[in-house]
Amino acid sequence: MPPPTSRPKAYDAAYFQRWYRDPALKDAAIGGPARLARKVALAVATAEYHLERPLRTVLDVGCGEGAWRAPLLKLRPKLAYLGFDASEYAIGRYGARRNLHLARFGDFALLRPCPPVDLLVCSDVMHYLDARELDRGLPGLAELCGGVAFLETFTREDGIEGDTHGFQRRPARFYRERLAAHGFTALGSHLWLGPALADGTAALEVPA
């Protein structure tokens, strides 16, 4: 007897409630406010360090409900935030208020919705994509990153907890090789220097 077919993953209201707002998870939730605030502060400080000026523009690919928007604007009230996600629920509910738009990761093979941004965010997305869609979208992300990228991605070497539905158990080198091929330079803590700034670092600012 063939194994039962697993249900397609749905990024609906129940998904976001379960993983981002479940009171039982407290700050262990993916989008727990204190955890998210630390990530945002790290990304903003790193981008501004390398740009040597305040952050002005952010593109959030796989933005979900746009959770990054509020903490970003709390730190930099004048920045322009733009988000894209494949969830029809998230875009239908929050799109107009939070400047979120409908698109899949692979659409960035052709999609260029803005000039290159100071900070590109793609958090908790790439390890759920099949390799074909990942490879389609990555060139677009490289072109759209004019500063620093926060690309939070987990691998089979990591102790994964939480949402494992659809998780692709790839080795870390899979992502390192692809990102490097598109001009990204690792900075650590899920942060990557975009191709536009790749030649402006000191030797000890990046891993050997």
Image (tube, rainbow, N blue to C red):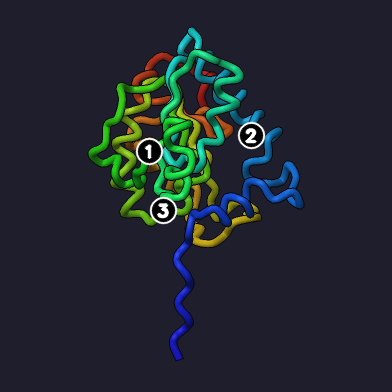
Q: Which mark is residue 142?
A: none
Q: Earlier in the sequence, mark 2 or mark 3?
A: 2
Label 2: few (<14), some (14–19) or many (≥20) C-alpha neighbours in 10 Å: some
Find residue 179 and report its horizontal and vertical position in percent.
39, 38
Q: Nearer the viewer, residue 116 or 63?
A: 63
- Indicate the secondary structure of the residue bearing disc 1: strand
Q: Position of residue 26 (x, y in %)?
A: 75, 45
Residue displayed at 42% across by 38% down: 61
Query: Circle 3 is placed at which residue position?
Result: 129
Label 2 vs label 3: CA separation? 22 Å
* Rendering quarter of residue 111: top left
* Mark 3, secondary structure of its residue: loop
Q: Can you see residue 10?
A: yes
**Three-letter amino acid code of the residue under disc 1:** His
Q: How busy is the neighbourhood of tag 1: few (under 14 within 10 Å), some, or many (20 plus)?
A: many
Q: CA distance from mark 2 to mark 1?
A: 21 Å
Residue 101, label in figure: 1
Q: Residue at x 44, y 20 (%)?
A: 80
Which residue lies at the image location 35% right of the left edge and 47% below the top edge?
Answer: 104
Q: Is residue 87 above or below residue 34?
A: below
Q: Residue at x 41, y 29 (%)?
A: 82
For the residue pair 6 and 197, the one nearer the viewer reads as 6
The reply to whether callout 3 and callout 1 are in contact (CB within 8 Å) is no
Residue 198, can we see it? no
